[in-house]
Each structure stands twice: as C-alpha cells, then as structure tokens.
Amino acid sequence: MTPDLHYLAYSAVLTWAMLLLASLIRASAWTPKGFLLAIGNRDSMPDPTVFAARLDRAAKNTLEGLALFTAVIMVAHLGGVAPDKIVPGAKLFFWARLAYPFAYLAGIPMIRTAVWTASIIGMVMILVASH
C-alpha cells in the first residue's frame, strides 16, 4: 500500500474512533443504563451535555472531512500521481484532523478554525499536485 493510502486508512480509523467515542459519551455507556442505551436502538437518547455535543459535532465534521479527503486522494491516486507528491498534503490533512477534536473540545474557536483550515490546505496541496 502506498503512503497516501496509509493516510487514508488512518483517517478512516480516526473517523470511526471519533464517531464511536461521541456515541458512547452521549449515551454515558460506562453506566449500566447508558450501556443498555448504547447497545440498543437509541430511541430515547438523553440531551447531550456541552462536552458530548461538542464531541458529536467534531465527529460529524471529521466524517464530512473524510468524505472529501477520500475523493481527493482517490482522484490523485487513480490519476497516477506519484505518491511522493501526494503524501505531504495527506500528512497535513491527517495530523490536522487528529488535532481537530482536541481544539474543538478545548472550546477555542480561533484554534479550531486554524486546525480545520490546515486540513483543507492539505487537500488543496493534493489537488495542486494532481495537475
């Protein structure tokens, strides 16, 4: 597997972990009642705490980013662009997305936006390398 596809796989795992964590936190899955809620149909989820709501928004944003990143990586990869041209953007995207939930949970809007912007720049780098 090429390094760019490794970063795509890492990003998929990160997204899965974010979605899972957000769901478990929202349900309070470490409690008996929350555990039953988490493994059930989740028809009566409690209102999220501020922390759980932030984590959920960060997870959803991570999922949206993964969809775009997947498209960008696949276009470059299938277009025959050399992996060494793609990897810098893929690295930037991945590390920015890894930092994103921490910035979001810290509640510092300017930092969160800067980290999000870095991930977008990573995708732009891949697109530029593809031309």
Image (spheres, rainbow, N blue to C red):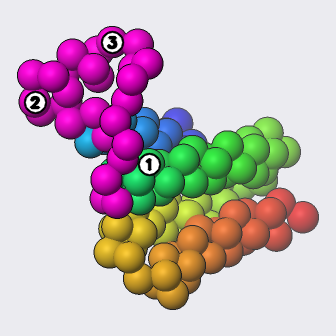
Label placed on residue 77: none
* Residue displayed at 42% across by 69% down: 104
Is 36 in the magenta? Answer: yes
Q: Which residue is mark 2?
A: 31
Q: CA distance from mark 1 to mark 3?
A: 18 Å
Name of the residue lying farthest toward the right: 131
Direction from residue 27 to residue 98 in the image, left or right: right
Whichever of callouts 2 and 1 sits on the residue coming sooner in the sequence is 2
Residue 79, above or below 32: below
Residue 38, above or below 47: above
Tell me the kind of residue under disc 2.
Thr
Q: Residues within 10 Å of mark 1 (few under 14, many from 20)?
A: many
Q: Residues within 10 Å of mark 3 (few under 14, many from 20)?
A: few
* Residue displayed at 44% across by 48% down: 56
Label placed on residue 40: 3
Please say if the residues under marks 2 and 1 sit with CB atoms less than 8 Å apart: no
Q: In which image quadrant can residue 39 be found? A: top left
Whichever of callouts 2 and 3 sits on the residue coming sooner in the sequence is 2
User: Is residue 57 at least partly visible in the picture?
Assistant: yes
Residue 75, above or below 85: above
Residue 46 horizontal/vertical position (percent) = 34, 36
Tell me the kind of residue under disc 1.
Asp
Please say if the residues under marks 2 and 3 sit with CB atoms less than 8 Å apart: no
Residue 36 horizontal/vertical position (percent) = 21, 16
Q: Which residue is mark 1?
A: 56
Q: In which image quadrant can residue 101 be found? A: bottom left
Give whichever of 74, 111 is nearer the camera: 111
Give whichever of 51, 127 is nearer the camera: 51
* Residue displayed at 36% across by 47% down: 48
Residue 111 horizontal/vertical position (percent) = 46, 84
SS for callout 1: helix
**Span highlighted in magenta in the image:** 26-51
